[in-house]
Structure formats: C-alpha cells, structure tokens
Amino acid sequence: MNEVNKTLFIPLYGKAKVSKQNIILKDKRAEEIWDTEGFLLEGKSKSKWLTYNLAMRGRIYDDWTDRMLVKNKKATVIQIGCGLDSRYLRVRMPYQKWVDCDLTEVIEVRRKYFKESQNYQMMSLNASDVEEINKLPEGSTAIVVLEGFCMYLTNQQLYELLNKLQTKFLKLHILMDIYTEFGARASKYKNPVNDVGVSKLYGLKSMKDFLSGLNLKIKAEYSLTPNHLISELKPMERILFRLLFTGSLYRKIYRLYELSSI
C-alpha cells in the first residue's frame, strides 16, 4: 500500500484498542483485522490519547448514520475512503443499500474480511476522479460518510466531489471531518499520519465560503470529543484527554460538519 492507504491502520488500531477495553465502541472485526494485518506503529500514531480520539470520531459517525437511517429508510449509505472500517456491521438501524468505497488495493484487503450481500457492496473508487462517482448505484437519497478522508483531497478535488454527488443524488446528507487551513499547516509538524509517510494534507479556510456555488448547506457542526464519550474514560484520563483534545485550539485545527441538500 502507498502512504495514504497506510493511514487506514491508525483509526483501525484505535477502534481495536478501545473495543478490547469495552469502551466507546465495540468492534470485534477491527480487533480481528488488527491482529492479522496490523504493523508496528510508532510515534504519535500509537498514542492512547489518539486512539480514544479516533474511536470517538468513529462512534459519532456511527450514531449519526443511525439517526439518518431512521429518517431516510430507503437511502443508500455511501462511505468513501472506507479503509478497513466495519461501520456497516456496527450500526443498529437496518439499511436497504450500503456501498463501501476505496482505492482498489484497499478493497482487495477488505475482501479478506468482509463479504458482500444483497444489501452490502464494496467498490473500487478513486475519489480524486469525480467521474468515478457515476459508478455508484442509482437512488434518490444518499447518506454519505466521509470520515478521515477529506484532508487527502485538494480543495478543488473536494469541491468537485461534492458537486458530483449533489448532481447524482436528489437528496444528500453528508458528514465530513476537515482540517482548517491552520490545522493543515500545523500537520506538517505534528500529525500521526506523518509516522506512515504522509507529509501533505489540505484544509479549508471557511466551510461556508467553500460551499458557495454548491446546493449544500451546513446543517450542523458537532464536537469530535463529546462529554458523554469522554465520560467513558477513567477519571484521570478524562482530565488529560480534555487538555489535549477539547477547547478552542482543537477547534481551530479540526472540525466536523453535517451538510444537507434539503
């Protein structure tokens, strides 16, 4: 795998670690895959604080997907840049169609651990080539999950991706985490993906300005470290975690937005 693809092991490690501790989220498949595919992580990427942070992010996406499925029972769920994530197994709500997408070499590894079904499909897709969005199944409503993904696309590539999605689907619900411009610059000096060889990430100056010209609006902004998940940590860990991953500085670096076309 190339350097960007190797970043998928960092959130996988986080989910496997917290799952074994029985906190934040339960993911036996992540435990299994990490035990088989994982490699020695070094530096910041193996920090227990980062594992908590990434696991919380995953849980927030899980809960949001469940809420969207309650409101949109016939929607197609599309996860772009899925890596080795097993969200389709973790969500509680039933779905009619779920498509996990990533680069070909990632999907090849996924097929060792996940099986397609009538409702679940894996698809090779290069999101930097927006014409590949045409390969996605037809449908009027899509719930789109972009977890830990947007920072690997330039602003122009991300804009074109969202524009193509809104053209393909009549109704669109998106959850996406992004770096700010400041966060992307800071990542050059301190970011766990540096430990697997990634040196260039991208951020947005203003989500509102970025969406200008698109038929999408900001529906909500969420905390990536909500109190109800921090409360699952040990008392002393809660104090240290809040120092590292909450507050105005963290928000200047990293944001989580829900977008909607309706």
Image (cartoon, rainbow, N blue to C red):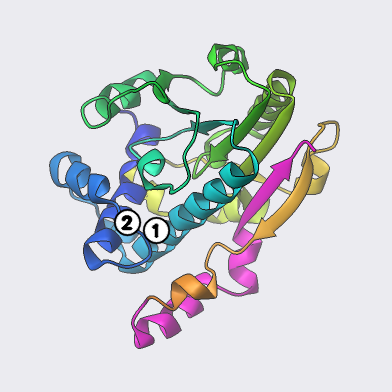
Quickly name the residue at label 2.
Answer: 14
Marks 2 & 1, CB-CB < 8 Å contact: yes
Query: Does residue 186 appear to the left or right of 239 in the view shown?
Result: right
Q: What element carries label 2?
A: helix
Task: Give the image location of residue 245, x and y in percent.
Answer: 50, 70
What kind of residue is marked 2? Answer: Gly
As for residue 240 lying within the magenta part, the answer is: yes
Taking the spot 49% from the left edge, 78% from the top edge, the residue there is 242
Task: Give the image location of residue 167, x and y in percent.
Answer: 74, 20
Task: Give the image location of residue 30, x and y in percent.
Answer: 26, 47
Region in magenta: 233-262
Above or below 183: residue 145: above
Is residue 243 in view?
A: yes
Is residue 189 in view?
A: no
Q: Which one is in front, 190 or 96?
A: 96
The quarter in which the C terminus is drawn is top right
Quickly name the residue at label 1.
Answer: 55
As for residue 128 lying within the magenta part, the answer is: no
Taking the spot 77% from the left edge, 48% from the top edge, the residue there is 218
